[in-house]
Image: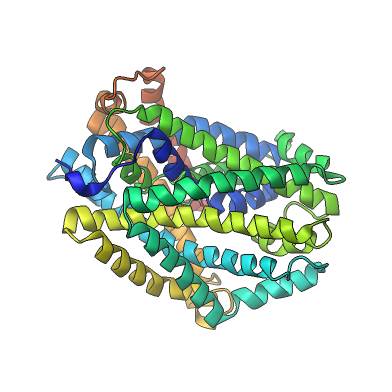
């Protein structure tokens, strides 16, 4: 039995906001636009939407079914369902992945704080050339002290929320931040599409050019869907474990997936018209929101306000995601090791900060992490490959194998329908979880192993 003092969301809406807070993050606002831009725009977006429906929604429901049934963290959940098996190690991989992702994600999140500060103090409000913007960015990410402090600050914010627990910390924070985020997004989207020449950006984003589709585009679209929906590591098992027994969980899960997708598309609607309006190529890569946008803000009317709103948005989105990453790890130590939430939050958060330092130093701060062990890759990118690519893919495949073939679709359906609400198409869901999802993610995994190209 789950202990009564684990905490619970106050209702369906609270869950949707918290889980959408986990899903909506740098993945939507930073990664989605540059990945779409690098992979041909509309065709990528179409594939992405298809994968959200065919893979994202089934996997999110599979995770939620496990969490709701067991009311446990990922390790405890597998222990409860199949004791004396190796399955709890899959939960262990999820907990390790939460830690691994947090240790590099917090570095990127720290950059957003610096940009927010810069926007407030007016650095990005003035006219800036592309070269000046690039120099500012490199100066920031290459400054060892600053990047470490920013990473630490972000992890500290995360600890302060997670230590307060499910309803007093995560729910309260996401209930305030998610509506703020939505309002900022909508204002920015209206601003962006009304820019002169902005329409061309929308055409690029929504008009598919099918000749652009190739292996990399397909793999990137599916990888982006997994990462963006926080799948494959038990975040949704954990958040689902706090779901009130009487409410409709599959409806809530689908709402989270749609909400996340809507925000990614909205981020695209903000960024591409802005790019096209000033004639910047959409395939500028990961520097898009940190290098390209600042040089655009300066040339826009009310550019400083635009910049403040945008980087506030990015910081908020990142925070509600780091909260879920730490929560998975904390829930494990609270449930399985009997730690208090306060102790688990501080100790594990601090340990994560220490492990994040090499990533913070890997963009110029220290040569040994910038080209790690002669791989030609920096430490942060290597961590993204290990945790963000391999581990999430393996986790998602194994999770489908577990739910589809070991625990069984009927048991998963019973958990999803235990509040008395019936799923519209339970047969379709079974086929997706048993066959479509593991095969699709399996192909992506083979693809990244063979080609060494990552999403
Ligand atoms: N989904 C988050 C984002 O898009 C990242 C994340 C991945 C969070 C996995 C939790 C678990 O930014």
Q: Is residue 116 above or below residue 2?
A: below
Count of marks, rendered view: 0
Residue reaching furthest to the right? 196
- Is residue 81 at least partly visible in the picture? yes
Q: Colour scheme of this structure image?
A: rainbow
Q: Is residue 63 above or below residue 358?
A: above
- Is residue 374 at least partly visible in the picture? no
The structure residue drawn at horizontal position 71% and vertical position 43%, both measured from the top left corner, is 189
Q: Is residue 419 above or below residue 117?
A: above
The structure residue drawn at horizontal position 34% and vertical position 39%, both measured from the top left corner, is 10
Tell me which corner region of the image, top left, top right, bottom left or bottom right, holds residue 200: top right
Tell me which corner region of the image, top left, top right, bottom left or bottom right, holds residue 70: top left
Which residue is at the front of the view, 377 or 142? 142
The structure residue drawn at horizontal position 53% and vertical position 67%, both measured from the top left corner, is 110
Residue reaching furthest to the left? 84
Q: Is residue 413 above or below residue 195?
A: above
Tell me which corner region of the image, top left, top right, bottom left or bottom right, holds residue 344: bottom left
- Residue 435 position, x and y percent, is 39, 29
Left/right placement of residue 448 relative to residue 292 reads left
- Residue 249 position, x and y percent, is 36, 30
Instruction: Give the quadrant of the N terminus.
Output: top left
The structure residue drawn at horizontal position 19% and vertical position 61%, both measured from the top left corner, is 339
- Residue 88 position, x and y percent, is 22, 48
Which residue is at the front of the view, 405 or 345? 345
- Residue 124 position, x and y percent, is 74, 67
């Amino acid at each position: 039995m789950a202990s009564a003092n684990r905490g619970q969301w106050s209702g369906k809406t609270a869950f949707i906001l918290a889980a959408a807070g986990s899903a909506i993050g740098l993945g939507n606002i930073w990664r989605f636009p540059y990945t779409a831009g690098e992979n041909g725009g509309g065709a990528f977006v179409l594939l992405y939407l298809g994968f959200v429906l065919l893979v994202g929604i089934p996997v999110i429901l599979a995770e939620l079914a496990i969490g709701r049934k067991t009311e446990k963290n990922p390790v405890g959940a597998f222990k409860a369902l199949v004791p004396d098996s190796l399955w709890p190690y899959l939960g262990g991989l999820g907990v390790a992945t939460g830690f691994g992702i947090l240790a590099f994600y917090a570095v990127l999140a720290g950059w957003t704080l610096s940009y927010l500060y810069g926007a407030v103090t007016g650095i990005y409000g003035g006219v800036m050339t592309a070269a000046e913007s690039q120099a500012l960015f490199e100066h920031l990410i290459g400054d060892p002290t600053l990047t470490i402090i920013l990473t630490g600050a972000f992890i500290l914010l995360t600890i302060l929320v997670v230590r307060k627990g499910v309803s007093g910390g995560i729910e309260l924070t996401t209930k305030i931040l998610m509506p703020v985020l939505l309002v900022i997004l909508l204002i920015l989207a209206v601003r962006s599409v009304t820019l002169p020449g902005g329409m061309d950006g929308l055409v690029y984003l929504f008009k598919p050019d099918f000749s652009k589709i190739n292996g990399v585009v397909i793999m990137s679209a599916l990888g982006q869907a997994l990462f963006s929906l926080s799948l494959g590591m038990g975040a949704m098992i954990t958040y689902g474990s706090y779901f009130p027994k009487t409410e409709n969980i599959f409806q809530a899960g689908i709402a989270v997936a749609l909400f996340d997708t809507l925000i990614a598309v909205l981020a695209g609607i903000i960024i591409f018209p802005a790019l096209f309006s000033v004639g910047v190529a959409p395939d500028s890569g990961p520097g898009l929101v940190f290098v390209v946008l600042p040089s655009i803000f300066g040339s826009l009317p009310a550019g400083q306000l635009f910049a403040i709103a945008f980087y506030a948005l990015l910081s908020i989105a990142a925070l509600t995601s780091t909260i879920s990453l730490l929560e998975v790890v904390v829930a494990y130590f609270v449930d399985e090791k009997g730690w208090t939430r306060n102790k688990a939050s501080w100790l594990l958060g601090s340990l994560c900060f220490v492990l994040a330092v090499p990533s913070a130093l890997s963009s110029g701060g220290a040569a040994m992490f910038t080209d790690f062990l002669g791989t030609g890759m920096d430490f942060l990118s290597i961590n993204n490959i290990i945790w963000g690519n391999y581990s999430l893919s393996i986790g998602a495949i194994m999770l489908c194998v577990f739910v589809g073939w070991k625990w069984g679709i009927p048991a998963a359906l019973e958990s999803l329908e235990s509040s008395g609400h019936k799923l519209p198409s339970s047969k379709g869901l079974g086929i997706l979880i048993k066959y479509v999802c593991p095969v699709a993610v399996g192909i992506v995994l083979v693809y990244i192993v063979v080609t060494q190209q990552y999403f």
